[in-house]
Image (cartoon, rainbow, N blue to C red):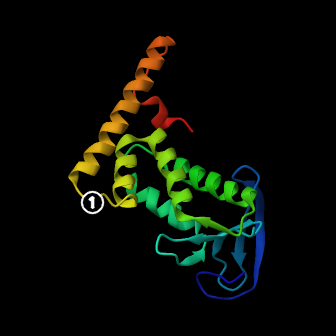
Amino acid sequence: MKCPVCGKIEDKVIDSRLAKDNTVIRRRRQCLGCLKRFTTYERIEEVLPYVIKKDGRREAFDRRKIVEGMLRACEKRPVSVDRIEAVADSIEQDLMEKSEKEISVSYIGERIMEALQNMDDVAYVRFASVYRSFRDIDEFIREIRELYELKETRTDQNLEHGSIDDNQGSQYSP
């Protein structure tokens, strides 16, 4: 492993442990050249499908794009990075289980929007406005009305079942 500080290849592993639901190995290393310590993560490389973009182009699946898009949507919102990572993990796992060679970007986008809708309404609207490329304010208002009606339906169902929905619980639960 190449040292990120001095670039030497020789190092020793100081500590290894499982991380992230036992799917990743975290290794603490020490460079034998400069003695600086650094951390690496090891995971099984799975074959993931190519993503078919809206314009027909195909590109390799990139989990980082899911995380970055969700981080932008959740900026200054009470959504933890761990929850965003969990959604990206879930989508990635789903794609591996599907074992398809190609998947539509719209499938991934809808999965992200579904997760955001359950996490934070503002983040959901932010993501939807970019993802769905609203043509005008009317489309945007229609989307917000649908979200509001869905929220009202959920509140009514919770009241019928005797639970209290303070609109905060779903934002902070894993």
Closer-to-camera residue (131/76): 131
In the rendered structure, which amino acid carries the disc numbered 1?
Answer: Arg
Against 102, is 145 above or below? above
* Image location (x, y in percent) of residue 18: 76, 55
* Image location (x, y in percent) of residue 69: 45, 61
Q: Quadrant of residue 19?
A: bottom right
Against 34, is 74 above or below? above
Closer-to-camera residue (165/97): 97
* Other-residue count near label 1 (Cα within 10 Å), few / some / many at <14 / 14–19 / ≥20: few
Q: Quadrant of residue 33?
A: bottom right
Q: Seen in the image, is 30 located left or right of residue 161?
A: right
Q: Work out whether residue 29 can be spotted.
A: yes
Task: Label 1, secondary structure: give it.
Answer: loop
Give the position of the C terminus as an image quadrant: top right
Q: Seen in the image, is 76 located left or right of residue 100?
A: left
- Residue named by callout 1: 135
* Image location (x, y in percent) of residue 17: 77, 57
Closer-to-camera residue (65/130): 130
Closer-to-camera residue (21/37): 21
* Image location (x, y in percent) of residue 143: 33, 45
Against 104, is 111 above or below? above
